[in-house]
Amino acid sequence: MPRDDTTDGRSRSSHREHDAAMADLSGFQRDILWVLYEREPCNGLATEDALESYYGTTVNHSHVYTNLDQLTESGFIDKRPGEGRANEYRLTEFARRALERRREWLNDRTSA
């Protein structure tokens, strides 16, 4: 993936930092990151719709946006103006690497 302005100093971190950062997230926040991994760029409503489809139930609108803001503040996602009033959310390079590490970790536990 080409380098862009969503890449920050955290993207050059060790594996341990990626793993620790993922461990500090809630399951809901990790699910948001996986939605963005699959669909980025993605606006908040599309993220909410994807989560509702996965969970099979309504997701609290403010809960989604609160967590998107927290993930932005913690350096996992980048928030940019999108079409109309909607914002677009994209993973940072740090988040992308953290998710890849998480997938490796899960695969190691399920392939035995």
Image (tube, rainbow, N blue to C red):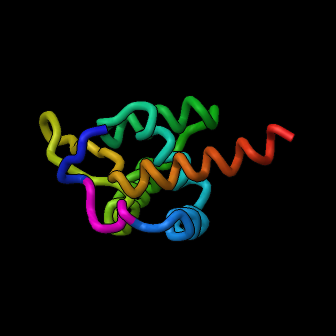
Q: Nearer the viewer, residue 10 or 70?
A: 10
> Which residue is the extreme one toward the right?
112
Residue, x 12% and y 36% (percent of image)?
84
Residue 86's place in the image compared with 9, above or below, is: above
Quadrant (top left/top right/bottom left/bottom right) for the C terminus: top right
Residue, x 55% and y 39% (percent of image)?
58
- Residue 19's spot in the image, x, y percent? 57, 64
Q: Is residue 93 magenta?
A: no
- Residue 75's spot in the image, x, y percent? 34, 64
Q: Nearer the viewer, residue 70 or 9?
A: 9
- Residue 37's spot in the image, x, y percent? 44, 39
Q: Is residue 105 left or right of residue 46?
A: right
- Residue 87's spot in the image, x, y percent? 22, 45
Residue, x 25% and y 40% (percent of image)?
2
Q: Is residue 8 magenta?
A: yes
Q: Is residue 103 left or right of residue 84?
A: right
Number of marks in picture: 0
Residue range highlighted in magenta: 7-12
Quadrant (top left/top right/bottom left/bottom right) for the N terminus: top left
Q: Is residue 90 left or right of residue 37?
A: left
Q: Main secondary structure of the magenta part?
A: helix
Residue, x 63% and y 37% (percent of image)?
55
